[in-house]
Amino acid sequence: MSIAENVARVRAEIEAAAIAAGRDPKEIQLCAATKMNDAEAVRQAIAAGVDCCGENRVQELTAKLAQNAYAGAPVHFIGHLQTNKVRQVVGKVALIQSVDSEHLLRAINREAARQGILQDVLLEVNIGEEASKSGFRADDILPMMEKMGEFSNICVKGLMAIPPISHNSGENLKFFQKMFQLSVDIKRKKYDNVKVDCLSMGMSGDFADAIASGSTMVRVGTAIFGARNYARDSSEK
Ligand SMILES: *Cc1c(COP(=O)(O)O)cnc(C)c1O
């Protein structure tokens, strides 16, 4: 199937999941997870109407920006970001979805201040408390929000999570529901430099469950572009 057909199918599935949950399908944005796909594939996904693209690695982001691959759609950063690479990302992407530490927040804020801009971010939550994943602990999110006033060049637009890999539908519902509750808890309060409207969760295998649990952005790679060829890429961690 072509990328355009895949995007249409994913859209239809998003719409069905939203309606089944009594939600307006327009509340849910489709972010194409473009890692390991070239500029031409990215252009096809944008032409097919994805809302934004999500890039995982700084090197790929930089290369595809140089090729003007994202013309027509905002690009987000969704991978682990090292503090020594913030200059290549801050101001280059509409949203950094994967802010996983206070240390990184400080580095982003410093760079955004240097550029004189406001950088939108999501805080990544390690909702499954997995040793292999980065992200804030769920318990640390509200205390971090209290401190956001210190970061005057950042606006926190919401939360992102990658729950444990699940093999059965419904397995991740408890994690998605915890994330939704956390975003509700944040929205109830008033914090400086925080304006939560995005809950980014759900990937190819579980976006319907994420939508049932209140996701407003799904990040979909495989279901749009097909399986990634990791063998081709020796630098993958
Ligand atoms: C690759 C990736 C996705 C998409 O995963 P698929 O299972 O291919 O849909 C979503 N989010 C992040 C952060 C990713 O790295």
Image: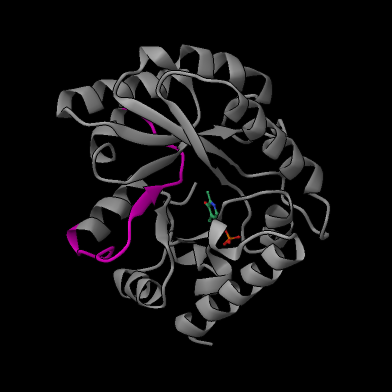
Q: Quadrant of ligand 1?
A: bottom right
The reply to whether the magenta stretch includes residue 69 is yes
**Image: 1 above or below 148:** below
Region of the chain picked out in magenta, as a range: 66-83
Colouring scheme applied when the structure was drawn: one colour
Residue 130: image location, x then y, percent: 70, 33
Task: Identify the residue at horizontal 32%, vertical 46% (top origin).
Answer: 94
Q: Nearer the viewer, residue 120 or 97?
A: 120
Q: Tally the marks.
A: 0
Residue 171: image location, x then y, percent: 83, 51
Q: Quadrant of the N terminus?
A: bottom right
Task: Identify the residue at horizontal 60%, vertical 19% (top origin).
Answer: 142
Report the side of 114 relative to 5 (left or right). Answer: left
The reply to whether the magenta stretch includes residue 232 is no
**Image: 172 above or below 233:** above
Task: Return the residue found at the far bottom.
Answer: 1
Report the side of 189 relative to 110 (left or right). Answer: right
Task: Identify the residue at horizontal 38%, vertical 49% (top origin).
Answer: 76
Residue 66: image location, x then y, percent: 18, 58
Q: Main secondary structure of the magenta part?
A: loop
Task: Identify the residue at horizontal 27%, vertical 66% (top origin).
Answer: 72
**Residue 126 seen by the camera:** no
Q: Nearer the viewer, residue 148 or 232?
A: 148
Report the side of 139 relative to 156 (left or right). Answer: right
Residue 194: image location, x then y, percent: 45, 26
Location of residue 41 by image quarter: bottom left
Report the side of 33 relative to 178 (left or right). Answer: left
Q: Nearer the viewer, residue 99 or 185?
A: 185
Location of residue 138 by image quarter: top right
**Image: 96 above or below 55:** above
**Residue 185 seen by the camera:** yes
**Image: 185 above or below 226:** above
